[in-house]
């Protein structure tokens, strides 16, 4: 019966993920991936063993380096992106509340 359904109790100390912070980090990771990829291109295909290998491995390496950079603090603009997204979300909530 539907009325017997109960939501599970929250786990003690559990904090829901901050979507704005996650999005900010993901944005910074995408930016850094492209940035690192352009830097690696300057090394030339010989570093990877030839043109075919360079095309295949450069993208993997760029993403791995970008992930490590973000995990270690990145360039610092993920916080600004998170703050802007949080402000936008709050403005949306305030608009909905004021319309009611």
Image (cartoon, rainbow, N blue to C red):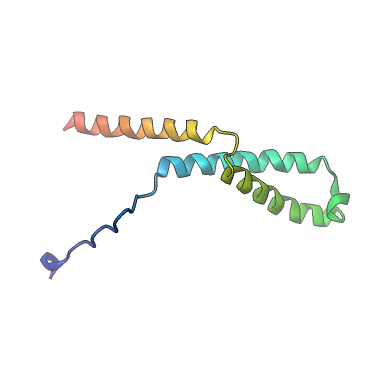
* Residue 92, position as x, y percentages in the image: 30, 33
Q: In the image shown, does 96 or 48 lie closer to the viewer?
A: 48
Q: Residue at x 29, y 59 (%)?
A: 11
* Residue 17, position as x, y percentages in the image: 39, 48
Find the residue positioned furthest to the front: 13
Q: Residue at x 20, y 28 (%)?
A: 98
Q: Quadrant of residue 82?
A: top left
Left or right of 87 on screen, residue 96: left
Q: Residue at x 87, y 56 (%)?
A: 49
Q: Quadrant of the C terminus?
A: top left
Left or right of 86 on screen, residue 95: left
* Residue 53, position as x, y percentages in the image: 81, 57
Q: Residue at x 54, y 40 (%)?
A: 27
Count how many numbered circles sit on residues in the image: 0
Q: Quadrant of the N terminus?
A: bottom left
Q: Quadrant of residue 34?
A: top right
Q: In the image shown, does 43 or 75 lie closer to the viewer?
A: 75
The answer to whether 36 is drawn above or below residue 52 in the figure is: above
The answer to whether 40 is drawn above or below residue 100 in the figure is: below
């Amino acid at each position: 019966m539907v009325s017997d359904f109960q939501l599970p109790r929250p786990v003690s100390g559990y904090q829901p993920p901050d979507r704005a912070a996650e999005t900010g980090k993901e944005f910074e990771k995408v930016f850094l991936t492209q940035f690192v990829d352009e830097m690696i291109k300057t090394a030339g295909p010989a570093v990877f063993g030839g043109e075919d290998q360079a095309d295949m491995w450069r993208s993997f390496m760029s993403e791995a380096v970008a992930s490590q950079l973000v995990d270690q603090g990145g360039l610092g603009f993920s916080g600004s992106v998170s703050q802007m997204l949080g402000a936008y979300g709050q403005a949306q909530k305030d608009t909905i509340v004021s319309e009611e």
